[in-house]
Image (cartoon, grey):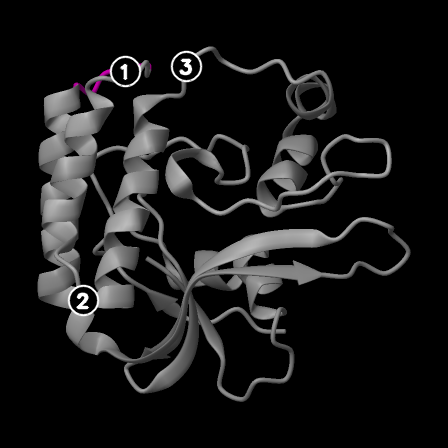
Amino acid sequence: MTAATRTWTACCPPKRAEESGNDRSSCGRPRRQGASSGGGPIPFLSHSRVSRYLHCPEQYRLYYIERLRPRAPHASLVFGQYVHEAIAVLLRSQGDPVAFFDNAWKEVRQLDVTYGRESWEKLRVSGNQLVEKFVREELHRLGTVQAVEQIFTLAITCLDVPFVGVIDLVGEVDGASTVVDFKTAASRYEAHEVMLSDQLTAYSSRSPGAPGRRSACC
C-alpha cells in the first residue's frame, strides 16, 4: 500500500494543535460506541492509541486503562476539531465554513478549556484565516466527493480488536482519487512525510486495491 504524494498547505495555523489521543470524540467528532460483554466500552485500536503506546506504554496505561485525563481539554485540540467541522460543513452541504467556525468558536469562550501561549482571540483569527484560505486556494482542486468524516473498521490478523478510524475526506483531488487527512500543523507536510505516515497508510488500506488512490495531508 503506497501512501501518496499530496500535501496541502491550507490547513496550517501558526502553531501545531496538540493531539489528544481521545479518538476524536469531543465536539461532535465521531467515535466508536457500544459496550463489551462486560458492560464497558468495546475495545479497539486507533492511530492515536497506537501512537500513544509507542511513545510511552505507561502513558497509554494511565490514559486509556486508568482513564487519568486532564480536567479540561486544551484549546488547541478544540480548535483543530472545529476547523475539521467547518470544512465538513462546506463539503457536505455547501454551508459557510467561516460562519460555522466563528459561531462555534464563540461558544468555546463559555467552555472550560486550557489555553497555552495562544489566546481565544488569536485562535479565532487563525481559524477564520485558515478556513478562508482553504476555500480560496484549495476548494477548486476538489472534484467528486465520495465521503466526508467516514468512519471505518479494519480487522487485524491475530488480534480480537479492530482498528477504527475516521477519514476526513475521500474524493477527487486534481482529478485523482485521494484519501485526505486534514492537519492543523505548524508547517506544511513534505512529500516524504506523507509517504511515511502510518496514519495515512492505515486509512488508505480501508479500501485495498482502489486504483490510483493516494493520501494527502492537509
Look at mark 2 in the image and give the residue it sits on. Answer: 94
Which of pointers 2 and 1 lies earlier in the amino acid sequence? 2
Q: Kindly state the secondary structure of the residue where label 2 is placed.
A: loop
Q: Number of numbered discs present? A: 3
Disc assigned to residue 72: 3
Q: Quadrant of the N terminus?
A: bottom right
Provide residue 28's location: percent of width, then percent of height. 40, 41
Residue 92 lies, with reference to residue 89, above or below; the image says: below
Can I make out residue 186 in this image?
no
What amino acid type is highlighted by mark number 1?
Tyr
Q: Residue at x 54, y 89 (%)?
A: 211
Say whether residue 131 is magenta: no
Please tell me the numbered disc located at residue 115. Answer: 1
Gap in angstroms between the C-alphas marked 1 and 3 = 10 Å
Q: Amino acid at mark 2?
A: Gln
Tell me how far mark 2 sits from mark 1, CA to CA: 31 Å
Categorize mark 2 by other alpha carbons within 10 Å: few (<14), some (14-19), many (20+): few
- Residue 140 in percent (x, y) is at 16, 75
Dot 1 or dot 3: first in sequence order is 3
- Prevalent SS, magenta region: loop
Q: Viewed as shown, does residue 120 lie left or right of 32? A: left
**Residue shown at 8% from the left, 63% from the top:** 136
In the image, residue 103 above or below residue 85: above
Bounds of the magenta span? 114-119
Name the quadrant of the C terminus.
bottom left
Query: Which residue: 75% across, 53% down?
Result: 162
Q: Mark 3 packing: few (<14 Cα in 10 Å), some, or many (20+)? A: few
Tell me what residue is drawn at x 55 percent, y 44 percent: 31
Q: Is residue 61 visible?
A: yes
